[in-house]
Amino acid sequence: MAKIVDNLEQIQSHIERAKQKSDGKQLVNIIAVTKEVSVDRTKEALQSGLIHLGENRPEGLQLKLESIDEQQAQWHYIGSLQTRKVKQVINHIHYLHSLDRLSLAQEIEKRAKHVVKCFVQANVSGEQSKHGLAKEEVISFIKQLKDYKKIEVVGLMTMAPNTDDENVIRRVFRDLKNLQQEVVSLQLQYAPCTELSMGMSNDYEIAVEEGATFVRIGTALVG
Ligand SMILES: *Cc1c(COP(=O)(O)O)cnc(C)c1O
């Protein structure tokens, strides 16, 4: 297994290169997705200077929380979240990347003790297997979140389709960015929507070229 510091160094240089091709000189945050690795490997990620950690299941998050000091990490919940699991998760995370329905927002409102930074998940590619709102639904959904005091819409999130066609992937990321700009232009206090969570091990460079501010990397970083 390669050392995480070495993987990180390589990924950072790829990100720098990709940033040169994007118009904005955005700050890109790397989320180390630890869902498939051990507690020790997760600790190695923290020792390598990573702060943002991502899990996609309540059990995985809980296991890591038992042995990692909560002050040390910023936890991102990146998987789809069942309403009945909200109470297990919501007060341990800083960011939720999968807000996609009002019933989930209602449960967060009920259970959260702090304001949760949320990404609204969009299924831009329209693939049936993917979670998230259709592109056309995102704006009206966000408008409906106005009275939820525990929810701050910090950005939009998407997953690119499973394909080797770079143009298809790029189009999905570009569409998400356009949608994000549309939300920004609404100037909603509870939805600054300045962030874009997009890009994984296989496509983070394209995502950064298209404006990603949070990339979620598992395999290439800690795998
Ligand atoms: C697993 C996962 C990732 C990381 O995937 P890799 O291909 O291992 O980098 C990113 N985002 C989500 C939502 C995931 O479930």
Image (cartoon, rainbow, N blue to C red):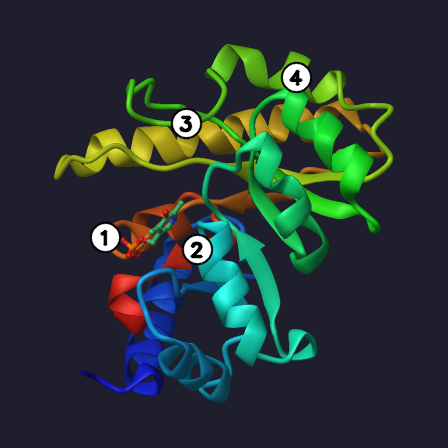
**Label 4 vs label 2: CA separation?**
24 Å
| Residue of label 4 | 141
Nearest the eye: 104 or 122: 104
Label 2 sits on residue: 215
Q: Kindly tell me whether residue 29 is visible in this rendering.
A: no
Q: Please tell me in which quadrant of the rendered image residue 218 appears.
A: bottom left
- Residue 46 seen in the figure: yes
Circle 1 packing at 10 Å, graded few (<14), some (14-19), many (20+), is some
Relative to 61, 222 lies left or right = left
Drawn side of residue 175 relative to residue 195, left or right: left
Contact between labelled residues 3 and 1, with CB atoms less than 8 Å apart: no
- Amino acid type of the residue that numbered disc 3 sits on in the rendered structure: His
Instruction: Looking at the image, tell me whether mark 1 or mark 4 is earlier in sequence order.
Output: 4
Residue at image position (23%, 29%) is 168
Dot 1 amino acid type: Asn
Q: Secondary structure at mark 1?
A: loop
> The C terminus appears in which quarter of the rendering?
bottom left
Circles 4 and 2 in contact, beta carbons < 8 Å: no
Label 4: how many residues lie within 10 Å, few (<14), some (14-19) or many (20+)? Answer: some
Decide which of tag 1 and tag 3 comes sooner along the chain.
3
From the image, state whether disc 1 or disc 3 is nearer to you. Answer: 3
Q: Identify the residue shown where x is 51% and y is 60%.
A: 61
Name the front one of labels 1 and 4.
4
Judging by the rendered image, the residue that carries numbered circle 1 is 202
